[in-house]
Amino acid sequence: MASLTKHGHPLLASLLTVSLAALTPVEAFAEEPTEEQKQALVEELELLKEETVSIAVRHEQPISEAPSDVYVTTDEDIRQSGAIDIPTILRRIPGMEVMQTTAAVFNVSVRGDNQLMANKLLVMVDGRSIYIDAGGNVFWKLLPVTLPEIKRIEVLKGPASAVYGFNAFDGIINIITKSPEEMRGTTLQFGGGEFGTISSAALHADTLGKLGYRLSIGDDQTKQWRNRNALAFRAYTFNVRTEYALPGGSNGVWPALSLPKGG
């Protein structure tokens, strides 16, 4: 009988050779990126992390490229704030001044130019102005926008009349809402505070092929400051928004109905 120790075995020797070859490290060569490629990659990653805004020049751009002082409040900021109305959210933004004169009346302005019936700050919802024509001011409690449907609030602090007209002398606030695709399903919100303040909202959104829709109902009420048993203000809002996907990746948007009612 042949000895494996002395003479070896042809098949076993072949297997050992293959195993050792498989364990031998193989040096891989990859092309090193150039400095220009590295820099381009870094800039692209920064843009992906950076918030985009449309308020400064009327089209989307990274906030770092905006030629004006722009501040963005996201939907996550709104959820964490505990606010039940938009003026309370704006009060948290540096440089904004919010003056509340009654349980239902707010005056909002920028950089110390606040006054009763303030009318030098342009307020928009999805790029459309919403001020009252008679005085150029905004009745905040009657805005047909509930907090859950807000995607972000862009604030431009400083004159922008050359781009937006006379109402933008002090600055601009643009409230951007979520699309039906971003809000698919049903959302309920309820909140309360001092002086009998109660705020509630119900929303439903869905998409049907290229068509999307969003419906929202809001109820906001508060008691008088001096007489807490008397109702100072109550407002109901109802809003419908429809979208249709157009060729080329764009969308047609129609705010079909907006019915604020105060009492």
Image: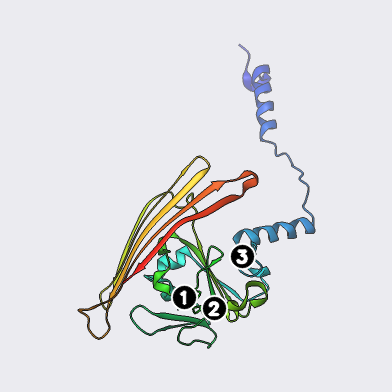
Question: Residue at coordinates 55% horizontally, 81% vertically from top-left?
Answer: 120
Reading the image, the residue beneath label 1 is 138
Residue 96 position (above or below residue 127) = below
Between disc 2 and disc 3, whose residue precedes?
3
The image quadrant of residue 148 is: bottom left
Residue 161: image location, x then y, percent = 64, 77
How far apart are the alpha carbons under marks 2 and 1? Answer: 9 Å
Q: Among all residues in the image, which is located at the extreme top?
A: 1
For label 3, the SS is: loop
Quarter where residue 19 is shown: top right
User: Compared to 184, does 230 lie above or below?
Assistant: below
Q: Residues within 10 Å of mark 2 (few under 14, many from 20)?
A: many
Contact flag, marks 2 and 1 (Cβ < 8 Å)? yes
Label 3 belongs to which residue?
54
Q: Are marks 2 and 3 in contact (CB under 8 Å)?
A: no
Q: CA distance from mark 2 to mark 3?
A: 17 Å
Q: Is residue 239 above or below residue 165?
A: above
The location of residue 73, given as percent across then percent down, is 50, 69
User: Would you say 227 lies left or right of 107 here?
Assistant: left
